[in-house]
Image (cartoon, grey):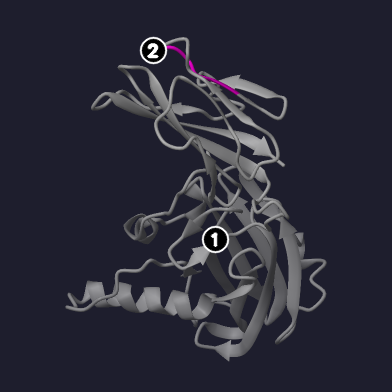
Amino acid sequence: MVRRPFTIATSELTELREYYTNENLCEVYMETKNGANCYVSVQCNDGKREYNAGGATWNVCYLGGRQYFNDPRIGDFSVTFTEKDGIDGEGLTGPVLQVKEIGNWQEIHAKDLAYQKEKDEDCKKHNGLKCGKGPYVCSWLDYNQENGRTRKWKCGVPKRGMKFPGLESNMPVNDRGFAPGWCGVHITQWQTPNALETKVFDANQAEIGNSGGKQGDKLKFGSKLPLWFLVDGSAGSDKPIKFEYDAQFWDTNDKDKHHCSVGAYDGGKREIDCGYTCK
């Protein structure tokens, strides 16, 4: 996945039924059963991970108990059930999801957000004039206060370094002023004459260096990264562009390891993105 400035549009998030179908989001599923038996899983487009299958290993499955987990795709996170017999049914309810890299443990109140979604949908069903439009970060699953004692919620959260309205995941920044990890490079290439403009981004999608505008077809420039970044498009405007950084060598044909995406020429120029590891 390429790391460049990216924000999921409000309209796109509003229409999502399964958060994990978006490559930049994961879905955190939370459940209680018969007033206890706390359970959580995280599902992204690369699969589902259970963190206490069968309700095991949840040490604080009681009112106000905060349980911590770690998922490599969203980082450290926690779940706290803050209510008992609340608006979302009997038993432990009112889950508060917190992710360390989103607002330094910003509280995501699943019940309140799901309730707002329910109200807006009901408003639309009755042809209301001022119905909310989202985005809907959380929702209830099989919501029915009279249907059993299993309570289910799900919330969409961005993968590490990604962002969408109200929730931005920011990985730690090092002493050089950038977040190491899976980083990105964006290139604008002009067809005639062949010329390049390049920008590099860290794991938080923050720009950390550039070529200083439109330059020639072969670039070497510094940034917040500790090493030079090299770009070579001298083979021609219709040929692959080569890259070099920290013993990584690739070109724009590499769609697997470096996830390169090459646009078509439009108005005499094209846009190109690739990913790479920075540290």
- Amino acid type of the residue tagged 2 in the rendering: Asp
- Amino acid type of the residue tagged 1 in the rendering: Val
Which sits in the foreground, 170 or 222?
222
Q: What is the residue that sits farthest to the top in this orientation?
A: 235
Marks 1/2: CA distance?
Answer: 39 Å
Residue at 35% across, 54% down: 12
For the residues labelled 1 and 2, say whether their Cβ atoms are less than 8 Å apart: no
Residue at 56% across, 70% down: 152
Q: Which residues are magenta?
A: 237-243
**Secondary structure predominantly adopted by residues drawn in magenta:** loop
Q: Classify residue 65 as left or right of residue 41.
A: right
Q: Is residue 141 visible?
A: no
Which sits in the foreground, 70 or 207?
207
On-image quarter of the N terminus = top right
Disc 2 crowd, CA 10 A, few/some/many (<14, 14-19, 20+): few
Q: Secondary structure at mark 2?
A: loop
Q: x%, y% of residue 199?
A: 49, 38
Q: In the rendered image, which quarter is residue 272 located in?
A: top left
Residue behind mark 2: 238
Residue at 59% across, 62% down: 28
Q: Say which of marks 1 and 2 sits in front.
A: 2
Residue behind mark 1: 157
Q: Is residue 252 visible?
A: yes
Q: x%, y% of residue 46?
A: 60, 42
Q: Classify residue 84 as left or right of residue 273.
A: right
